[in-house]
Amino acid sequence: MAKEKENKNKKTGQIKKTVNVGILGFGTVGSGTARILVENKDLLSARLGFPVTLKKIADLDIKKDRGIALGKDVLTTDARQVTDNPDIDIVVELIGGLGVARQLMMRAIKNGKHIVTANKALLAEHGQEIFGAAKKCGVNVGFEASVGGGIPIIKALGEGLIANRINYVYGIVNGTSNYILTKMTNEGVEFSKVLKEAQELGYAEADPTLDVGGADSAHKLAILASLAFGIPLSYESVYTEGITGITPLDISFASELGFKIKLLAIAKAADGQVELRVHPTMLPKDYLISKVDGVMNAIYVNGQETGDTLYYGRGAGDMPTGSAVVSDIAGIAQRIMSGAPPKSGLGAIKMKKSGPPMGLRRMDEVESMYYFRFSALDRPMVLSKISGVLGENNISIASVIQKGRKEGGAVPLVILTHKAMERNVRKALKKIDSLRAVVTGKTCLIRVEGEE
Ligand code: HSE
């Protein structure tokens, strides 16, 4: 009796005994989420003070045995039994992609369902539409699982660090790319060979473009930056470069210079502007993040008050990501039970700028240190011509390595710079790459983070 009173909805006056959940998509994350809801039902119920019930799961394939003990009417091939079901309070979208997932999510929102999703691409590219509709319909959208899998980074940014002005957020947020770079580093093998192996082992998707091309990291960065800096989702403004051009030669030069190469997603605020970029980055080997290998993810958040904080864990997989999904389900279930209004300020994506106005810094204006590997002709005056062009463009050299001897041919010439402006770097490389008496091919450029 006492419990029923606790769960009286303040708005409707109704006594609700359970919160009902429907899942769209019974793939990897759908299975992890269902397993947690079924196998940890008592634990969740004890922690929340009421049960959360998995009512329906919709998927095209409901024949495959996922080894989860489900009630007999739970599985359906009809998504509308989830989106339009009057018994369901929370719709969990785990289909992924921008097509049917978007239609079903919008339908569920319009039907007054709260949403939980792991779909970073959909949120980053159509977030305004989704969060706008959710606001209009008075429902919550939970997206803890969209970044960093099992790492509670969304809560950390939206709640744990609420007292801080955030200076920067950067991290490894794509496990596939990190796995490939780690293998290339440890075994000295080519990108294409490692990718093929990773696909055979099921670590990389059949179409790995989103992962290795950097877009997946850019989607995640747009979400993190919106929370960290109170800016609207800015996926189109994220400068994005993937890892497909990284070679064992660059990894080996990086190592010689004391660096590791990681695919980093970087959001930095300075002088009222935020820069958003995803690209392979050289990091000093002794940085903690340089030791984050394999499929693991790690995200640094630097708060004005806390200084650096670091979040590490599994960024993908059924159970870690399912854990994040269920944490959102639990949070929304508590709001439903207490009649609390949808989350808005704290930990919510901004529909427009909030707090001090922050502009976006153009990539041209970003400053970084750089690693260049020139395919330099092995003859006198070449180094002086290259350094001359760099100097003319205000780019100061920190160190130089040249190895090998190939008279009449090209040898790798590596130059590490002090901080320089991207615009100047592009201008200088365009000039150098056009000097046929100096280089034989396009220069490889990798940005460098760390102390000067
Ligand atoms: N494809 C992602 C990765 C996992 O490789 O990290 C899901 O976000």
Image (tube, rainbow, N blue to C red):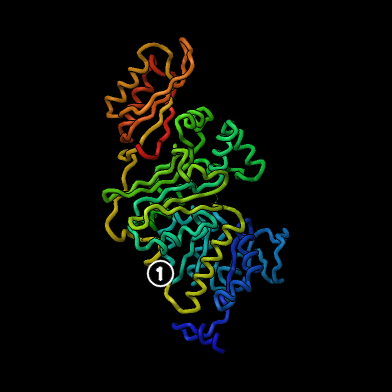
Residue furthest front in the image = 286
Amino acid type, residue under disc 1 in the picture: Lys
Q: Secondary structure at mark 1?
A: helix
Please say if 127 is above or below 241.
below
Residue 250 locus on image (x, y percent)? 49, 29
The reply to whether residue 51 is in sight is yes
Look at the picture and state if 54 lies above or below 424.
Answer: below
- Residue at horizontal 57 percent and vertical 46 percent from the top: 295
State the image quarter where residue 133 is shown: bottom left
The quadrant in which the C terminus is found is top left
Disc tally is 1
Quarter-of-image position of residue 371: top left
Identify residue for label 1.
136
In this view of the protein, which residue sits in the foreground, 194 or 44? 44
The N terminus lies in which quarter of the figure?
A: bottom right
Crowd rating for badge 1 (residues with CA inside 10 Å; few <14, some 14–19, many 20+): few
Q: Residue furthest bottom?
A: 1
Q: Position of residue 375 (x, y in %)?
A: 44, 21
- Of residues 82 and 436, which is closer to you in this image? 436
Q: Examine the image and state in which quarter residue 378 appears.
A: top left
Q: Identify which residue is drawn at 36% across, 61% down.
A: 351
- Residue 63 or 238: which is nearer the viewer? 238
Q: Is residue 143 left or right of residue 431?
A: right
Residue 376 is situated, as x and y percent measured from the top left of the image, at: 42, 18
Q: Position of residue 358 (x, y in %)?
A: 29, 53
Q: Is the CB–ligand 1 distance for label 1 below 8 Å? A: no
Locate residue 103 relative to residue 419 in the image: left or right. Answer: right
Residue 98 visible in rendering: no
Position of 156 relative to 254 (above/below): below
Position of 231 compared to 180: left or right? left
